[in-house]
Image (cartoon, rainbow, N blue to C red):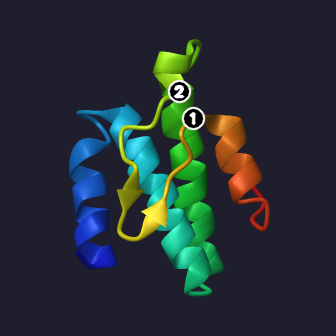
């Protein structure tokens, strides 16, 4: 899948399943960061945090990732806003 296709999937799911969309936004941030596109990486990193803020993230079950690997990006076992900030610390989120 290409980044544009993944971005389209993200746009389609962010209102329907914000929890999964938050993980996809994180993956998009990582992919754009790896490509050196800081602007898009920051945008998707902020979007990931915004979506996680909308979700209940209180138990380990709430924080367990839905995706193990997505587009070659390995997601952590536990994910939430602070994990995103830590993993994308090169960006100003």
Residue at the (57%, 35%) spot, across then down = 78
Q: Position of residue 28 (x, y in %)?
A: 45, 65
Q: Position of residue 15 (x, y in %)?
A: 28, 36
Residue at which label 1 appears: 78
Q: Are marks 1 and 2 in contact (CB under 8 Å)?
A: yes
Residue at the (56%, 13%) spot, across then down = 59
Residue at the (72%, 38%) spot, across then down = 82
The answer to whether residue 39 shows anywhere in this view is yes
Mark linked to residue 63: 2
Mark 2: secondary structure: helix
Q: Position of residue 31 (x, y in %)?
A: 50, 74
User: Which quarter of the picture shows residue 2?
Assistant: bottom left
* Nearer to us in this view, 13 or 77: 77
In which quadrant of the rendered image does the N terminus lie?
bottom left
Mark 1: secondary structure: loop
Kindly report the distance in space between the C-alpha atoms of the residues bearing marks 1 and 2: 5 Å
Against 74, is 3 above or below? Answer: below
Furthest residue in direction top, as rendered: 59
Q: Compare marks 1 and 2 and give the one earlier in the sequence.
A: 2
Lateral position of residue 52 relative to residue 81, left or right: left
Q: Position of residue 62 (x, y in %)?
A: 48, 20
* Nearer to us in this view, 66 or 24: 66
Against 43, is 20 above or below? Answer: above
Mark linked to residue 12: none
Against 39, is 77 above or below? Answer: above
User: Which quarter of the picture shows residue 13?
Assistant: top left
């Amino acid at each position: 899948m290409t980044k544009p296709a993944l971005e389209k999937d993200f746009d389609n799911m962010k209102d329907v399943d914000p929890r999964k969309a938050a993980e996809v936004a994180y993956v998009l941030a990582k992919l754009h960061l790896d490509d050196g596109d800081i602007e898009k990486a920051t945008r998707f990193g902020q979007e990931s945090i915004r979506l996680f803020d909308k979700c209940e993230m209180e138990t380990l079950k709430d924080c367990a990732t839905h995706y193990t690997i997505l587009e070659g990006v390995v997601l952590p076992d536990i994910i939430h806003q602070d994990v995103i900030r830590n993993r994308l610390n090169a960006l100003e989120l």
